[in-house]
Amino acid sequence: MKKKGNSRILYVAQEIFPYLPESSIANTCRYLPQGIQERGKEIRTFMPKYGCINERRNQLHEVIRLSGMNLVINDTDHPLIIKVASIQSARMQVYFIDNEDYFQRKAALVDDNGKFFADNDERTILFANGVLETVKKLRWSPDIVHCHGWLSAIVTLYIKYVYNRNPLYEHSKTILTLYDETFSPSLNKEFFKKLTRENIPASAIKLLEKDPSYVNLMKTALDATDGIIIGDKNINPEVLEYAKKSKKPILEYQDGEEYVDLHNEFYNQL
């Protein structure tokens, strides 16, 4: 039987240092899970296995018992491969969602010329489903699902509208951390239709039907989340205003050493 309180935290991360270069998201997702684990909570941490991650140097290996699932996106089967690596100094494992169609290219979210990948909409769908299906295989029930970076944002929708009927997720709360990030141009205009095929209600994603822009994606995710954390000093003003007007629990930006303790308290209160 689980301990009382929010004792199991699932981190869904767009990027983590040292697997990708240092950034606000990458650093938070490297050090926050470690700090939370050191405070007695169980954690699981996931990120995409972008093709630019050196598997040999970072000692990634496939987890055969978790791999082998097929995810259907836009009527096409996509095999899922799960890999894992350890950050030894943190005593922390990181699981990687891999797929040949979406994550083998030698870049993360934009190509060598800085051009936004045209299939980033389907990559976020595969990443969200891949994480939540893998956690099901682990038979691990998270109290909190904490999303970092826009690529993870639709996980809030899946927890609220799709996986809420699964016993492992029926009591899970979601948190979305907002960062100083954006993307351009908008996601594929078919993104709305693809999400409705995932059994996400059209009424919950109506902003994405109009324009699947960064701002509309984050507003849609904020509508579905249970808690909000401000992860950077500078957040898109429209997104920040929308978050504040939501009246949902918010942890304001913290840059001091106590940020892990404040996150820990925020988890406990949600």
Image (cartoon, rainbow, N blue to C red):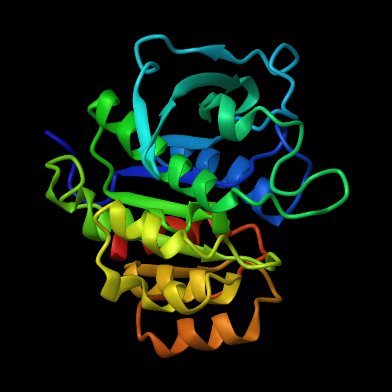
- Give the vertical position of 96 relative to 177 (above or below): above
- Give the vertical position of 90 relative to 259 (above or below): above
Closer-to-camera residue (41/173)? 173
The x and y percentages for residue 136 are: 25, 31
- Give the vertical position of 265 relative to 44 (above or below): below
Rendering quarter of residue 193: bottom left
Q: Left or right of 9: which side holds 95?
A: right
Residue placed at 59% from the left, 50% from the top?
A: 120
Q: Left or right of 171: which side holds 127?
A: right
Residue placed at 42% from the left, 90% from the top?
A: 245
The x and y percentages for residue 36 are: 46, 44
Q: Quadrant of the C terminus?
A: bottom left
Q: In which quarter of the image is the N terminus?
A: top left
The x and y percentages for residue 16 are: 64, 40
- Residue 154, visible in the rendered structure: yes
The x and y percentages for residue 216 are: 51, 76
What number of labels is visible?
0
**Residue lying furthest right:** 113
- Give the vertical position of 246 relative to 124 (above or below): below
Closer-to-camera residue (162/117)? 117
Closer-to-camera residue (24/242)? 242
Rendering quarter of residue 43: top left
- Residue 41, visible in the rendered structure: no
Residue placed at 86% from the left, 43% from the top?
A: 112
Q: Left or right of 168: which side holds 154?
A: right
